[in-house]
């Protein structure tokens, strides 16, 4: 049975988007090499198939450069992150940002630098909201 459609990139599509967000445009071979360097060794045909699916989904665009196609992201990284996080927040935590933050603090290995950065963001947000 075919997988039902999603408004979010699949795990593999997201990995390819991360490659393209770091540096674009990229050829199929460059995307394949970057994925392999990250421990995800795929065939050339697998990479081009997924990239072409991503073109149809309007996640990336394809342009001809010489004999090869180059791929560039159409969707912005921050927008994808926000939509996926909002979906997680609503589906898993019933819309509670507090529950998400508490779960992350309880279950993640957060070092003192990360905790300090979180503290600063919380303090800034509190100032923005006012008394």
Image (cartoon, rainbow, N blue to C red):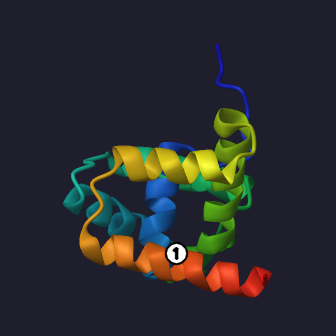
- Quadrant housing the N terminus: top right
Where does residue 10 sit, x and y in percent of width and height? 56, 44
Can residue 67 be seen here? The reply is no
Nearer to me, 61 or 8: 8
Where does residue 85 sit, x and y in percent of width and height? 63, 54
Rendered image quadrant of residue 117: bottom left
Using residue 35 as the reference point, say whether residue 13 is left or right of it: right
Where does residue 93 sit, x and y in percent of width and height? 66, 38
Using residue 58 as the reference point, say whether residue 124 is left or right of it: left
Where does residue 91 sit, x and y in percent of width and height? 71, 35
As drawn, the residue found furthest toward the front would be 131
Nearer to me, 79 or 2: 79
Q: Residues within 10 Å of mark 1 (few under 14, many from 20)?
A: many
Rendered image quadrant of residue 61: bottom right
Residue beneath disc 1: 70
Q: Does residue 2 lie above or below 17 as drawn?
A: above
Q: Residue at x 54, y 54 (%)?
A: 101
Nearer to me, 32 or 40: 40
Total numbered labels = 1
Q: Does residue 77 lie above or below 65 as drawn?
A: above
Q: Residue at x 67, y 59 (%)?
A: 55
Q: Residue at x 25, y 67 (%)?
A: 111
- Quadrant housing the C terminus: bottom right
Can residue 56 be seen here? The reply is yes
**What kind of element bears circle 1?**
strand
């Amino acid at each position: 049975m075919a997988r039902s459609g999603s408004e979010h990139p699949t795990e593999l599509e997201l990995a390819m988007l991360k490659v393209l967000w770091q540096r674009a445009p990229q050829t199929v071979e460059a995307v394949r090499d970057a994925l392999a360097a990250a421990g995800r060794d795929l065939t050339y045909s697998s990479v081009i198939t997924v990239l072409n699916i991503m073109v149809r989904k309007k996640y990336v665009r394809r342009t001809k450069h010489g004999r090869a196609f180059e791929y560039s992201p159409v969707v912005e990284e921050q927008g994808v992150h926000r939509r996926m996080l909002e979906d997680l927040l609503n589906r898993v935590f019933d819309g509670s940002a507090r529950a998400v933050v508490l779960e992350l603090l309880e279950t993640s290995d957060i070092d003192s630098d990360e905790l300090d950065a979180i503290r600063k963001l919380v303090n800034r947000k509190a100032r923005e909201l006012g008394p």
